[in-house]
Amino acid sequence: MSFETLGLSEELQSAVRTKGYTTPSPIQKKAIPVILQGKDILAAAQTGTGKTAGFTLPMLHLMSQNPPAGNGRRPIRALVVTPTRELAAQIQENILEYGKNLSLRSAVIFGGVSAKPQIRALKDGLDILVATPGRLLDLQNQRYIDLSKVEFLVLDEADRMLDMGFIHDIKKVLALLPKNRQNLLFSATFSPNIRTLASKFMDNPVSVDVAPRNTAAESVKQTIYMVHKKRKVALLKHLIKKGEWKQVLIFTRTKHGANRLAKRLDRAEIPALAIHGNKSQNARTHALKSFKKGDVQVLVATDIAARGLDIEELPWVVNYELPNVPEDYVHRIGRTGRAGQTGEAVSLVFDQDESKLLRDIERLLNKSIPKEVLEDFDYTVKIDPEEDARNRENRGRGGRGRNDSRGGRGNNSRGRNDRSRNDRNSSDRSVSDRNASDRKPNERSNDDRRKTENRGAEKKEAVATNEKQSGGERGEKKSNRTEENGKRENNRNSRNDKNKNRNQKNRNKKNKSNSKDSKEVIPEGNKKSKGVAFSKASKNKKYGKKGPLGYGMYPLE
């Protein structure tokens, strides 16, 4: 079967031939006729089998055959929702390549970049919109997006969207769409949750399974190397340099682990870049382009790159750490062996930490992954005694002594010194014991007795010096505290004296002003008397009754 027998337009067939495809993949053979009939579809296929072209080609054919009526602004007629930015950008590239001979407009929107260019593209009018859920709802809330005319809804990698917590966003998007539309769900794996979600909004979907669920492609050779975690970097360098691997995609479990591994490979003269969620979109795009062009030999990524990245003829994928979710292993190794090519997936497994993860993956694949051992690589873990001593000392410094609340700072520092001294003494004792085993009994006893006396003397001197230092520190602290208390008391007394003098001055000024304002009333009949006469009504009152001479003041008659 060829693309000509699928019923696609000549413009699409020409674009497919330009890309070098002549025969459709199994998922394309089964999915394209169903979509051209206008039915809902629930399709599951292995990673790298052409699922993107499986829904892009028939959707473009139907939209080109039924253009919208009117000459106004183009409404959004097709909506493609993806979980990651990289996958959204890849789908947009495929739409542009397949639809280059059609008069259809498309755009992609996602977070991490400025929304202004995306808003301008939306204002100009679009036929197809590729988006991630977050930015889609953000611009829709700002009334830049109208989804009332959508005819096609595509959920690509829907299970990954559920794993990333987009279930509520998907429900919000579904509420904005018209009921009369065609729904297309494509993914490499379909969990029971996906099938439950599909049953709620799809109309009698046709299930298409071209391969058993959660299986890896047969074109990918899988190999496991059992190695200690401290020897993983050395084994990885050995594989890359001796095997002359020119393009390697390495997966780690954490973002910080990806950064550390990329730096260590770069120091070993293996050009490497990291890509993960903490990187800006510009940095992620730059790293991906450099890796595709061959400017960078190694791309270290988290599971953000395990979905939808289409790197042509990628030969090697390495699981530096096994994923926590077994299904992610299928997506990781699916980055190689795509479009009929062959590839190899290598996993570095530490038995003590990752044996359970390996069993879960083998149970999912329903087969055991072959294990190999390199004869020209030393798997033994080499521990440097000096480095081990430094690690013990660092652990002692960062342990209980630093956060212990039962003693003061002096006690903590003294505890750390004692611990480091004990570590040195223990190492000295171990060396002396090994040397003493080769001596005669009498010589060993004399030497041991001499060393015991020396250690006792050193310990007494250390205790004495610590006591002197601690005693001196306590004396200095006590004297400093006494001086500070004396200074505070002097300042307090000086402030009290100043306040007393100020209050006394205020009282004197008040008394003087009162004496100036008051006038003595001298009776006319008795000028020798300087007393003041009060009326009977003003007696037993606080202020008295106001008279012609003031409160309580009356002239004597």
Image (spheres, grey):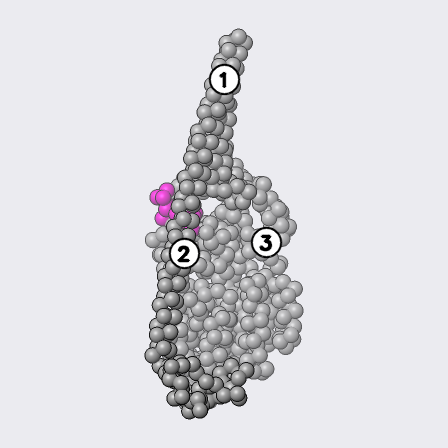
Residue 125 sits above or below residue 112 on the image: below
In this rendering, position of residue 440 left or right of residue 494: right
Residue 337 position in % (x across, y down) = 49, 54
Main SS of the magenta part reads helix
Q: CA distance from mark 1 to mark 2?
A: 58 Å
Residue at left 51%, top 71%? 133
Residue 453 badge? 1
Q: Earlier in the sequence, mark 3 or mark 2?
A: 3
> Over which residues does the magenta segment extend?
259-271
Quickly name the residue at label 3: 326
In this view, the residue in front, 331 or 467, is 467
Ranked by sequence position, the earlier of labels 3 and 1 is 3
**Secondary element at tag 1:** helix
Task: Evaluate whether residue 21 shows in this view.
Answer: no
Q: Are marks 3 and 1 in contact (CB under 8 Å)?
A: no
Residue at 43 percent across and 72 percent down: it is 108
